[in-house]
Image (spheres, grey):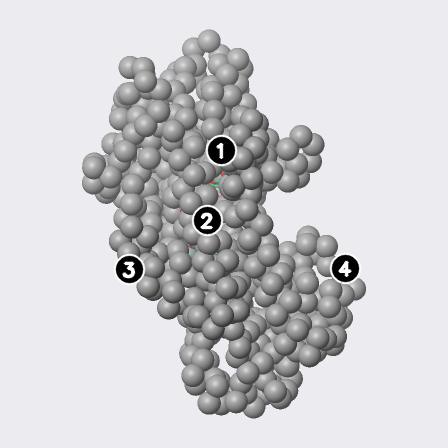
């Protein structure tokens, strides 16, 4: 099947960068990215993209207006495309059955209904969003029950494994591309049509194909395994702090075992981001739905340790600051859930700032990419009272402004610039004793100690 035009429903952190890269690598393809959100589309068409990712602006500049188009005309985009990617959000459901655990599939269903409504002829529908296993069959049922008799569909699963902050790198050089399809002649043709798009820049041996359910499930399982490693090392970080071991040294020692490997063993204040917790909760819910309570309980521990790690960090700050932080200024360095992104979804900083504000600390936040409004909105959504934000939250233009008059400095995101700050200047600006709580273990601790800071490092202690 010859594909000339593809479209993507959803111009978010996945849809935007993924389609921009496909357009850049496949100049012969027309790529249309469509979203309901007018502001987001306007931003994709401007010089200030709605997503911050290293090198994303270059990739977009190369293809936009040539073969990459951003639009709110969702129906027009579907009509024109032979292949439709669905990259809408699948957040944790906040209401009704499965609230707090199941994936909310309302955006997926609404996208499927729009596709059914306007489609004629044959189209390949590609699930890019992360969804519970068996969703492809629900999509197919909706498409077939609501479309014109001339419309036919193949549904593929093609989960995205990019990580934010390295999205372009991950898209250009993926570990693997996973495509799930039906074991029918039509299914094989559709899989090959999608595989041949990726083959423009990904070696064929890295494009793997499976059945639909394995592909859908693999995405959630990959995130479960990755986050499990972080909760494992974070649980050990507590033991290191209690015993005098250093979690970095332990991670290095175990990571050199080739069976364990060195990556994803960085102890932290807790993992964040829009995917890990959501997909773990979804996995737990799936296991419960399939009557596997022991499996559900096993994976729910990964989330529990992560929540505990965040509150443990706050507890450590309060205890160390002589059991009271009331009206003490605490400089918070970093609000994004990791470096090199402006994304704050589920960032550990939300819990840490919320809990410190509830202790009546005065919080002075600096993040190189997150806007003041973004920080405020996250804390409001986390239940912090507006009056408390007005009186106790300040957003600062740099780390020095945040440190001025601060009793403590807490590093919550591993931005490179934090390790290279002018610490003698910061020490002068702070109230003494000047405490540092390094939730990412990135600061030059020997230098800090010589300067007179009292340092707490995650996984190492005071
Ligand atoms: P996002 O919230 O940034 O973007 C989703 C977009 O879909 C929004 O802009 C929304 O307006 C739009 N949308 C909703 N319904 C629509 C419709 N019917 N038609 C057109 N647009 C519609 O979400 P995201 O971070 O890009 O994630 C999308 C999916 O990819 C999720 O399932 C997520 O789990 C998965 N995923 C995310 C990442 C990541 O790093 N963010 C990585 C891999 C997979
Ligand atoms: C994750 C997966 O890595 C990616 O494959 C999937 O497509 C989407 O979800 P992302 O959430 O963007 O990507 O970033 P990731 O690098 O995985 O980091 C997630 C969180 O874990 C961040 O808060 C990060 O700081 C934290 N983390 C990561 C650690 O605390 N320690 C580590 O060793 C690694």
- Please rate how many residues cluster around mark 2, counting C-alpha atoms within 10 Å: few if below 14, some from 14 to 19, many from 20: many
Residues at marks 4 and 1 touching, judged by CB atoms closer than 8 Å:
no
144 lies above or below 23: above
Q: CA distance from mark 1 to mark 2?
A: 19 Å
Residue 108 visible? The answer is no
Q: Is residue 22 left or right of residue 444?
A: left
First of labels 1, 2 by sequence position = 1
Q: Is mark 1 within 8 Å of ligand 1?
A: yes
- Please rate how many residues cluster around mark 4, counting C-alpha atoms within 10 Å: few if below 14, some from 14 to 19, many from 20: some
Q: Regarding mark 2 in the picture, which secondary structure is present there?
A: helix
Q: Of tags 1 and 2, which is closer to the observer?
A: 2
Q: Position of residue 415 (x, y in %)?
A: 45, 68
Q: Position of residue 224 (x, y in %)?
A: 46, 43
Residue 416 visible? The answer is yes
* Residue matched to label 3: 256
First of labels 1, 3 by sequence position = 1
């Amino acid at each position: 099947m010859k594909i000339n035009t593809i479209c993507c429903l959803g111009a978010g952190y996945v849809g935007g960068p993924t389609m921009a890269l496909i357009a850049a690598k496949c100049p012969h393809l027309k790529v249309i990215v469509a979203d309901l959100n007018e502001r987001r589309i306007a931003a994709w068409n401007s010089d200030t993209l709605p997503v911050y990712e290293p090198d994303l602006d270059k990739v977009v500049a190369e293809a936009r207006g040539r073969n990459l188009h951003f639009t709110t005309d969702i129906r027009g985009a579907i009509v024109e495309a032979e292949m439709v990617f669905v990259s809408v959000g699948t957040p944790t459901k906040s209401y009704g059955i499965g609230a707090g655990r199941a994936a909310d599939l309302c955006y997926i269903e609404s996208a499927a209904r729009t596709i059914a409504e306007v489609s004629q002829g044959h189209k390949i529908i590609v699930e890019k969003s992360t969804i519970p296993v068996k969703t492809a069959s629900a999509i197919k049922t909706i498409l077939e029950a609501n479309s014109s008799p001339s419309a036919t569909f193949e549904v593929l699963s093609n989960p995205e494994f990019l990580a934010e902050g390295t999205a372009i790198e991950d898209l250009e050089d993926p570990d693997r591309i996973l495509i799930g399809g039906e074991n029918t002649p039509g299914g094989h043709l559709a899989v090959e049509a999608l595989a041949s798009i990726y083959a423009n820049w990904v070696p064929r041996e890295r494009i793997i194909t499976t059945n639909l359910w394995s592909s859908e499930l693999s995405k959630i399982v990959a995130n479960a395994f990755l986050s499990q490693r972080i909760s494992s090392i974070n649980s050990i970080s507590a033991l290191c702090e209690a015993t005098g071991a250093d979690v970095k040294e332990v991670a290095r020692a175990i990571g050199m075992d080739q069976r364990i490997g060195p990556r994803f063993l960085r102890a932290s204040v807790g993992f964040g981001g829009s995917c890990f917790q959501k997909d773990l909760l979804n996995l737990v819910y799936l296991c419960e739905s399939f009557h596997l309570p022991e499996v559900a309980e096993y994976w729910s521990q990964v989330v529990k340790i992560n929540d505990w790690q965040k509150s443990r960090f706050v507890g450590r700050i309060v205890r160390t600051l002589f059991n009271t932080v009331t009206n003490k200024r605490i400089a918070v360095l970093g609000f994004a859930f990791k470096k090199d992104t402006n994304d704050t979804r589920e960032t550990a900083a939300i819990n840490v700032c919320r809990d410190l504000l509830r202790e009546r600390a005065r919080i002075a936040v600096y993040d190189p990419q997150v806007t003041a409004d973004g920080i405020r909105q996250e804390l409001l959504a986390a239940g912090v009272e507006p009056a408390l934000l007005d009186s106790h939250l300040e957003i600062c233009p740099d780390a020095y402004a945040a440190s001025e008059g601060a009793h403590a400095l807490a590093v919550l995101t591993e931005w490179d610039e934090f390790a290279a700050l002018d610490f003698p200047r910061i020490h002068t600006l702070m109230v003494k004793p000047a405490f540092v709580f390094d939730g990412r273990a990135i600061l030059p601790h020997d230098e800090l100690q010589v300067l007179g800071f009292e340092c707490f490092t995650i996984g190492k202690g005071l």
